[in-house]
Amino acid sequence: MCQAIEQSTISSVVRDSAFPYIEGAHVLALSLSIGTVMWFDLRLLGAAMRTRPVWEVFEDVKPWMFAGFGIMFSTGALLFAAHATKAYSNGYFQAKLALLMLAGVNAAVYHLTIDRRRSEWGKAPIPPGPARVVGLVSLLLWFSVIAVGRIFAYSL
Amino acid sequence: MIWEFLQPMAQWLGNSSLGLWLGQSTDRIAWLFVIHLFGLTLLMGPTLVLGVRLLGIGFRSRKLAELARDTVIFRMAGLVLMLLSGSLIFTGGAVSYFEGEWFRRKMALLIVALVFNFTLFRKVTNAEDGRYSPLVSRLTGLVTLFLWFGVAVAGRAIAFS
């Protein structure tokens, strides 16, 4: 399947001419995606914006965060298409996908459990233990995604 | 002219034992780039937040000065990480980086961005809401975003030229 992707027109256009621009957009959108999700994580940790209810911080960052991850996933998919076979078998790429999935699971667990009771704790300057764990895990996972992503680019 | 004046220093730095040590290992440079990107996230995320707040298109429920105060530690930490890792990356390939057109553009933009950040940007973001006219706020937001994203784009262009 990776070979089929690589033989597509889109793949060759990215490879031959658009790669620097798409990779540039992928890197710059870090500020929108991880750069904003980080605020929510820091709020969950009780390390920033303590006087603001948790849900308000989330509403503030939400549109920018979603826009950022939208750009990340679409540019990321195009970059993958350009070198699908090599990327697919690369350990760093596999690690990156695994970390992304873990970050997704972490966010889903938060929204399905702790966040449901946010009216009970959302105004506290320092949220309860489970919420802090989610914030910390999220920060660690996203920074690991950056690290393996960058090393991956070197190993191609 | 200024570049010719600085050239011997780049030469010296690139041929120093630190420069040679850094330059001989791809791994070392790769990890420095990881740190450089951590710094980018820390600096550019909040800067973008403040920029869109200045433009009046987001985070409107928050007071500007409050956002600036909440984010200043992270922005400064990001900036320090970027400057340190960037200096080391440069040291590892000083002579060839120094000749690059995009490297020079990046440095020129970076200096303007830093001056702007610590003068007008700081003044406007630390002021009470309503102290500066919307026009001044919007322009400050626009220039800030333009300068920092310009630095980032030029940085990316170095890798591809």
Image (cartoon, coloured by chain):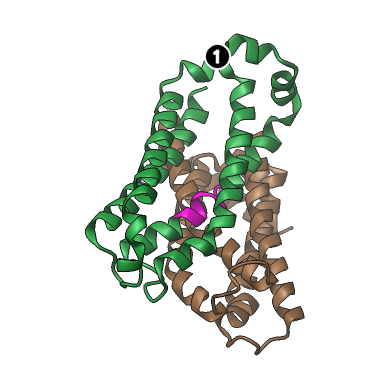
Chain colours: A green, B brown
- Residue appearing at x 61%, y 85% in the figure: B129
In the depicted structure, whether residue B93 falls above or below residue B83: above
Report x, y in % for residue B127: 58, 86
Place residue A3 in its image quadrant: top right
> Could you tell whether A99 is left or right of B1 in the image?
left
Total numbered circles: 1
- Residue appearing at x 60%, y 29% in the figure: A77
> Could you tell whether B71 is left or right of A13 in the image?
left
Report x, y in % for residue B80: 45, 60
The chain holding disc 1 is: A
Q: Is residue A33 magenta?
A: yes
Residue identified by numbered label 1: A85
Q: Is residue B110 magenta?
A: no
- Residue appearing at x 45%, y 32% in the figure: A151
Residue type at mark 1 is: Thr
In the depicted structure, whether residue B67 falls above or below residue B81: below
- Residue appearing at x 45%, y 36% in the figure: B30
Looking at the image, can residue A139 be seen?
A: no
Looking at the image, can residue A111 be seen?
A: yes
In the depicted structure, whether residue B156 falls above or below residue A10: below
Place residue B96 in its image quadrant: top right
Place residue B54 in its image quadrant: bottom right
> Could you tell whether A44 is left or right of B13 in the image?
left
In the foreground, B22 or B121 = B121
Local secondary structure at mark 1: helix
**Magenta stretch bounds:** A30-37
Q: Residues within 10 Å of mark 1 (few under 14, many from 20)?
A: some
Extreme residue toward the left, this view = A129
